[in-house]
Image (cartoon, grey):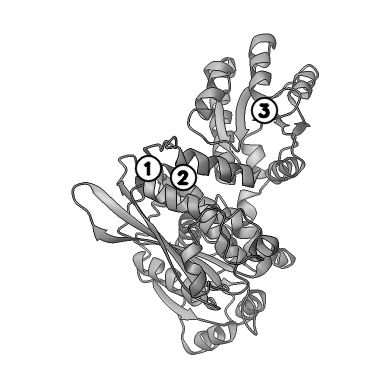
Amino acid sequence: MNVINDILDFSKIESGKMELESKDFDLRTCIEEVLDVFAGKAAHTGLDLVYEIDENVPAQIVGDSLRLRQVLMNLVSNAVKFTQHGEVFVKVHLPKATAGNGLEISFDVQDTGIGIPADKMEGLFKAFSQVDSSATRKYGGTGLGLVICEKLTGLMGGKISVTSKYGQGTCFTFTILTMAGTKSGRADMHCNMSGLAGKKVLVVDDNATNRCIIKKQLEHWKLIPTLANSGKEALDILSQSAGFDLLLTDMMLPEVDGIELAEIVRQRLPGLPVILLSSMGDNRCKDHPGLFRSVLTKPIKQHILCKNIFNELQQPGAVNGVEEQTGKQILSVEFARHYPLRLLVAEDNLINQQLLLKILSLLGYDAALAENGQEVLEMMDKANYDIILMDVQMPEMDGLETTRQIRNNKKLQPVIIAMTANAMQGDQEECLQAGMNDYLSKPVNIDALMNTLKKWAGKMLENPELPAGKR
């Protein structure tokens, strides 16, 4: 499927039929969603995924978020694929001012991987080309990814280049021409740290890039960071300096890991709150309940870090705070108690079924499952559902036709939320025209899923008699 998609995109671009959207979108969300896709693989390999957006880059920009995401996906995928140790770092900045309201934004995707030999650089942006003849067998790929990146950046008014040192790493840099968006960004991005200026935070991380990024962010919030590159150094600092308000530590540290550090700190300084930064899939902290005030999954999202820090510094002694997206809070059964819903998941892919049902279960829902549209109709004859999470592409009867059947033939009308990996222009309109109420993209974004469930639960509470098609 990846090969086919690459060839189709390549053909579309070559024929001049690739059309770009021009809409406001949140740049930070776009980057975070890309990195989320690779978080599991990076954690398994032991890589750090890190990103930084300069403060002068607008939060909202105008352009085609899908195509920007596609370029980033290709470049980050390559970086993760060819890097066994160290980090993959995405940096966004403004290289220079542009005339009028236009902006040129530059993206660096830098890794500490195997690098590219100098004599192979010339063929990187040629169709079906690989760095060497064994690359496809060892690493996979079509040889089209970088060509598509070059074409797409050109369509977005920019260009792409690469620098590399063989055996040390590679940096792909691309630019796009855009302008600042007019819509307001996510409300949760604007974390108010007023009243907390001067609070002291000890940051412990063996990755220098991550330490530097967290330091800049804390200083932007008027906090005072102190940095340590190991658990041992952190303990030395704590023994020599008093008055720290918060300890922010990575899990993977040399000599003394995050859990051991937190246990020692609890014995010596029981009143010092500790926030843990942990890789996806690392569940060792669950064996130590109460040791950490909150656990944040890497790569760390700015608004999540902000909310957790604010919660701890504003309310000393509070546990878990108000965090929406990490640790125990996001996957709490309390969510279903606040938003009681009868859910039906319509999905034919086994992995997607397991993922979605697991997320819903951790949110407190006992969701029913149908593997195709015909099963959905049969199950609706036996039970009532408030919301159906409807995959669009299913065998026997797809999600669009199933929705039409429900709207035309069923007395009780549920809310139907489309779930599809397709994000081409017109797909959302097609879903809504078929009678669906809302639209979610795959892979599942937990924030988006929770916000959608909240929204429709609220509308049902406001007017339970309102037909689903008009909610």
User: Between disc 1 and disc 3, whose residue precedes?
Assistant: 1
Q: Which residue in the structure is indicated by mark 1?
A: 63
Q: Is residue 349 left or right of residue 132?
A: right
Residues at discs 1 and 2 in contact (Cβ within 8 Å)? yes
Q: Residue at x 54, y 83 (%)?
A: 234
Measured from the top left, where is residue 239 in percent x and y? 53, 88
Q: Nearer the viewer, residue 381 or 19?
A: 19
**Quadrant where the N terminus lies?**
top right
How many marks on residues? 3
Label 3, on which residue? Answer: 388
Residue 60 visible, this orientation: yes
Q: In the drawing, what numbered circle is on residue 67? A: 2
**Given this view, does label 3 or label 2 mark the residue nearer the observer?**
2
For residue 359, which quarter of the picture?
A: top right
What amino acid type is highlighted by mark number 2? Arg
Give the residue drawn at x 56%, y 85%. Answer: 235
- In what element is the residue under mark 2? helix
Give x and y (percent) for residue 176: 35, 52
Is residue 22 depicted above or below 407 in this figure?
below
Quadrant assignment, res 361: top right
